[in-house]
Image (cartoon, rainbow, N blue to C red):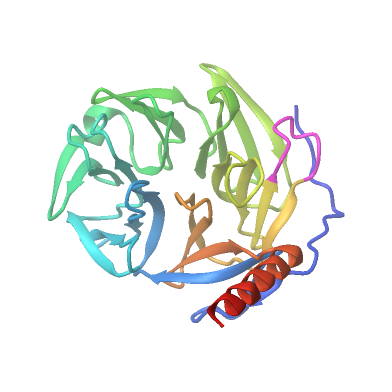
Amino acid sequence: MQRMKSASWMTGAGVLTLSAGLAVAQTATGFTVESYADVIEPRRLSFDAATGDLYVGHGSNSAREISVVSGADQSVATFGGLLSDADAVYFDSDGMLTGLAGQVLVGSGTGLFAAANGSSTPLVLPATGGFSNPTEFVSDGAGTVYFTDYQGMAVLSLNGGSVSPVVTGLAPTVEGLAIGPGGTLYTSDRSGTLRSHSGPGDTQDIWTSAGAEYRWMTESDGSGSIGEGLIVWDQTSSELLLFEDYEFSMAPTVLGTSFGGVKGLEFGPDGYLYISNSADQILRLVPIPAPGALAGLGVGLLALGRRRD
């Protein structure tokens, strides 16, 4: 099934927050766009849910460490050993993927690595793993990580130290990856196509938009600040799109506008959406409280003031 995007999207009124390094302000309806941290060449993102620490891949072809943003004070430090083009990161909380809890799985053009504080150990190399350039990781929560291979035009899995092809023959610009209901994999690419992969050999074009360039995506389970669905960044329009219907029977909602140079999307343990960009920033979308909630807060503060009197 292939559906064309509606041309009558409504963006609504948003809150504009100017961010240093970008020519235009990002707008997200119902959210404040916060500058969370400054990180050089940030790419994909992965959280330690227990501490709130955020691990950030980098896009440099020169060897350097990945970064970690402290969940306590947003300070930025380096992490791991020197790696080139280490875009993809995944925090391995229980050690099922890297062999040691608390390490970070890193995908580089030179292989898959287990990064610890100050070192990086090769896990699987392209020559033996059958891949070229890991770009994005997602986990099924049961010991398997899936990743897109940008140059290999495929989705592969890592489980028990073994890499296996899951989907092949994709567009040469496949980048975004997410897991939806029932474990279905979704991919996005620069041709403006979203695809579903529900099993070996079962690939369907589920949404196509001529002229769009769908890059990065993440899945919202509806428990945080944004309703359930897939969030996709369209480079052509600089919009963040929310596909709320997994049947893809309706046009997406424009969640945000003027988001240029997006390099990664990820939900944090606080339920907020975090965004990395080419202006060396990590942004965060924080919901604006409803007027009723603000009014209630004001009444509560007045009551507290009376008690202190």
Residue 237 visible within the image: no
Taking the image as drawn, is residue 208 in sight?
A: yes
- Position of residue 273 relative to residue 152, above or below, is below
Vertical order, 229 against 266 (above or below): above
> What residue range appears in magenta?
243-251
Quarter of the image that includes the N terminus: top right
Numbered-mark total: 0
- Name the residue rendered at 64%, 63% in the picture: 238
Question: Could you say which quadrant of the image residue 187 lies in?
Answer: top right
Instruction: Depth check: give the residue in front, 33 or 168.
Output: 33
Q: Residue at x 67, y 52 (%)?
A: 241
Is residue 246 within the magenta segment?
yes
**Would you place residue 244 above or below residue 274 in this image?**
above
Q: Main secondary structure of the magenta part?
A: loop
Work out whether residue 16 or residue 109 is closer to the camera in this orientation and state it.
Answer: 16
Residue drawn at x 58%, y 39% is: 221
Q: Is residue 207 left or right of residue 67?
A: right
Q: Which residue corresponds to the image point at 56% horizontal and 83% vertical from the top-left? A: 309
In this view, 70 is above or below 220:
below
Residue 236 image offset from top left, x and y in percent: 65, 60
The location of residue 80, given as percent across then percent down, is 18, 54
Residue 142 location (% of width, % of height)? 38, 24
Say whether residue 256 is magenta: no
Q: Position of residue 65 (x, y in %)?
A: 22, 59
Q: Quadrant of residue 133?
A: top left
Judge from the rendering whether residue 250 lies leftward or rightward of residue 36; answer left or right: right
